[in-house]
Image (tube, rainbow, N blue to C red):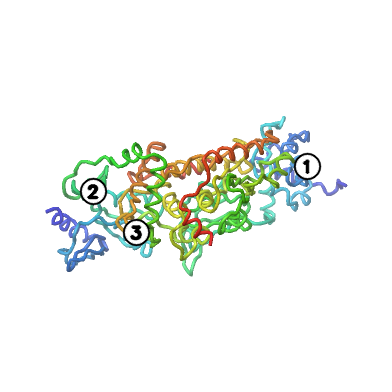
């Protein structure tokens, strides 16, 4: 089993580390967990998808000197790399224990790259082409697009779950909480400003790694990852850039703002 | 009156020794720079020719203590026109360097960083046209953290840093987000005329691109349904202002910036043009017509053209019809 192999890699790596961030299953509940040397690893589990990069980011923010590992899917490795590209953490001391996603999950995520750069165990599966994007672009007229997103965003209960769970939402002061833009305590959220801020500040900035965490967190089932995937596709065709594929000195948005 | 005994040749030598100051004495005093100068249009007291002349004579005290040496924003409109090819903004920089050494400070406001919320991503560092921002370890809550730091001798208070900051951590007093929002009249909702069939268009212009009196007076008395608001630089207009306007009673937004190569803050106009294009792409995905958000240049020679730009935008938006989406939301938002 893949999880057994990963457990044994984690056991080895833990000897030289202060801890490893992974998911743990106890009494049927799965939560993020920091395993420390000597811990029982039988609770360590791989699934479901979860933005563990966010957990690692937040621990390192408070304790930057810790030497930590992380059990990471492809998207989470990309999230870590993109966080480093935005100077939000240093990868020098982070050990990534990568593993590939299953073909089923890859299909569910419509993920083009369902594995990290380096895998510690398991077999890579083929990436999936996101057909929804082409369908959306081809089949929907402007009026249909507007009606579609209005209907979707009207469901928003403004829980900020999509923001809070996003590994690339690292601001201390969130624009979506500024009274100037979004009036507190009022529903429905301002269309389109509320979701435009979220979209611009993540996918629009080239930060989105397509981990689907926002969509998983959304209690109203708003297909946020579809909107962000469309934006990522636009950015890819404009700048040839995909968030988190590699360490870069300056992501494209830095170059654009520099050159004007 | 210039008193010869007060002239200080050592001062001239100090400027010449600074990088950029070498060409101080090649000036002919022809005044072409002053005729071109954008700052001078708004502050007739500012005259680059006179500053160079006084500095060249060695009037140390008069030059260093004047507010004018800090006013040049290095837009370099004068540089290509100078018959002696003097890079005047660089000479200004050299004079400032001498001033800073002698303990003079730039007057007026500069960008302020909220160290507590700054995430040190460096986007403002990349965006600043004056290389006035660096990431430094800054004192915070008894410890230190990495944060943006503004060099007040270099900052021109254009606010472009504010427009790119994701976490609202850098602002310039006088044109904060809140202040601009108030000026735009977007909170809670912009009421533009009463005629139902008139397109409601918000026009945001930079401080420096309206030159002709007729343009300025048109801006002050626009036709019904149009509101014109000034910002320091078109590059100050963050994407969220555009999205916000489309939701708060406006059918279309036109941002007017200086012509390419004429930006008072070097590249703010180019930044904004790119930003408007990006917002158009996003709006298109959401099913909102691209032309509801527009960007237009207005060059220094395009006198009297401003009304045409506005009328074109109004015409475009009129053709699209009013933005009556989610009328229920709109009504609720208005309450």
> How far across and down, in percent of the image, does residue A5 sit?
14, 54
Residue B130, visible in the rendered structure: no
Chain bearing tag 2 is: A
Secondary element under disc 2, as helix, strand or loop, is helix
Q: Are discs 3 and 1 located on one and the same chain?
A: no
Label located before the other in sequence (2 or 3): 2
Secondary element under disc 3, as helix, strand or loop, is helix
* Quadrant position of residue A42: bottom left
Alpha carbon separation for disc pair 3 and 1: 59 Å
> How far across and down, in percent of the image, does residue B3 sit?
87, 47
Alpha carbon separation for disc pair 1 and 2: 70 Å
Alpha carbon separation for disc pair 2 and 3: 19 Å
Using the image as rendered, state which of residue B309 and residue A213 is in the foreground: B309
Tell me if label 3 and label 1 are in contact, CB under 8 Å: no
> How far across and down, in percent of the image, does residue B143 sit?
46, 67
Tell me the mark number nearer the camera, choosing from 2 and 3.
2
Q: Which mark is residue B50?
A: 1
* Quadrant position of residue A110: top left
* Quadrant position of residue B177: bottom right
* Residue neighbourhood size for the residue with mark 2, other residues' Cα within 10 Å, grouped as few (<14), some (14–19), many (≥20): few
Secondary element under disc 1, as helix, strand or loop, is helix
Count of all numbered marks drawn on residues in the image: 3
Q: Residue furthest front?
A: B196
Residue at mark 3: A165
Residue at mark 2: A108
Using the image as rendered, state which of residue B305 and residue B265 is in the foreground: B305
Q: Are discs 1 and 2 located on one and the same chain?
A: no
Chain bearing tag 3 is: A
Is the residue A139 above or below the residue A166 in the image? Answer: above
> How far across and down, in percent of the image, does residue A162 sit?
36, 57
Q: Tell whether B1 sits left or right of A52.
A: right
Q: Residue furthest top?
A: B83
């Amino acid at each position: 089993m893949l999880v057994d192999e990963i457990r044994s890699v984690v056991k080895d790596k833990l000897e030289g580390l202060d801890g490893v961030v992974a998911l743990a299953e106890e009494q049927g509940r799965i939560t993020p967990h920091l395993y420390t040397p000597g811990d029982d690893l039988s609770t360590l589990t791989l699934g479901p998808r979860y933005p563990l990069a966010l957990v690692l980011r937040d621990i390192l923010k408070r304790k930057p000197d810790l030497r930590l590992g992380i059990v990471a899917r492809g998207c989470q490795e990309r999230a870590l790399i993109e966080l480093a590209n935005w100077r939000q953490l240093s990868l020098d001391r982070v050990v990534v224990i990568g593993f590939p996603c299953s073909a089923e999950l890859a299909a569910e995520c419509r993920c083009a790259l369902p594995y990290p750069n380096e895998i510690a165990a398991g077999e890579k599966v083929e990436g999936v082409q996101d057909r929804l994007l082409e369908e959306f672009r081809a089949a929907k007229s402007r009026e249909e697009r507007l009606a579609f997103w209005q209907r979707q965003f009207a469901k928003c209960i403004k829980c900020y779950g999509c923001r809070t769970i996003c590994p690339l939402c690292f601001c201390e002061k969130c624009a979506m909480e500024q009274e100037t833009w979004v009036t507190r305590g009022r529903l429905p959220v301002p269309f389109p400003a509320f979701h435009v801020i979220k979209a611009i500040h993540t996918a629009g900035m080239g930060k989105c790694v397509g981990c689907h965490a926002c969509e998983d967190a959304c209690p109203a089932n708003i297909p946020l990852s579809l909107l962000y995937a469309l934006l990522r596709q636009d950015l890819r065709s404009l700048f040839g850039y995909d968030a988190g594929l590699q360490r870069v000195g300056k992501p494209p948005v830095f170059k654009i703002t520099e050159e004007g | 009156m210039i008193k010869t005994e007060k002239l200080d040749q050592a001062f001239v030598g100090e400027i010449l020794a600074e990088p950029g100051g070498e060409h101080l004495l090649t000036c002919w005093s022809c005044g072409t720079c002053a005729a071109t100068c954008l700052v001078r249009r708004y502050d007739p007291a500012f005259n680059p020719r006179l500053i160079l002349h006084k500095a060249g004579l060695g009037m140390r005290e008069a030059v260093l203590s004047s507010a004018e040496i800090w006013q040049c924003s290095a837009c370099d409109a004068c540089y290509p026109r100078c018959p002696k090819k003097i890079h005047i903004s660089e000479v200004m920089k050299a004079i400032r360097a001498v001033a800073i050494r002698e303990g003079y400070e730039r007057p007026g406001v500069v960008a302020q960083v909220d160290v507590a919320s700054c995430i040190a991503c460096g986007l403002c560092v990349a965006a600043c046209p004056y290389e006035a921002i660096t990431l430094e370890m800054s004192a915070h809550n008894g410890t230190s953290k990495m944060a943006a730091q503004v060099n007040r001798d270099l900052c021109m208070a254009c606010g472009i840093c504010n427009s790119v900051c994701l976490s609202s951590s850098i602002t310039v007093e006088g044109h904060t987000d809140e202040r601009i929002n108030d000026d735009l009249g977007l909170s809670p909702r912009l009421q533009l005329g009463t005629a139902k069939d008139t397109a409601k268009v918000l026009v945001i212009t930079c401080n420096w691109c309206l030159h002709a009196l007729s343009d300025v007076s048109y801006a002050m008395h626009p036709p019904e349904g149009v509101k014109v608001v000034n910002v320091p630089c078109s590059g100050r207009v963050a994407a969220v202002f555009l999205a916000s306007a489309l939701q708060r009673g406006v059918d279309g937004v036109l941002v007017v910036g200086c012509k390419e190569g004429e930006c008072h803050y070097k590249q703010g106009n180019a930044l904004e043009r790119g930003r408007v294009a990006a917002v158009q792409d996003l709006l298109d995905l959401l099913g909102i017509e691209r032309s509801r958000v527009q960007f237009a240049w207005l060059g220094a020679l395009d006198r009297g053209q401003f009304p045409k730009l506005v009328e074109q935008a109004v015409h475009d938006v009129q053709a699209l019809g009013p933005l009556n989406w989610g009328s229920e939301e709109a009504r609720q938002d208005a309450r």
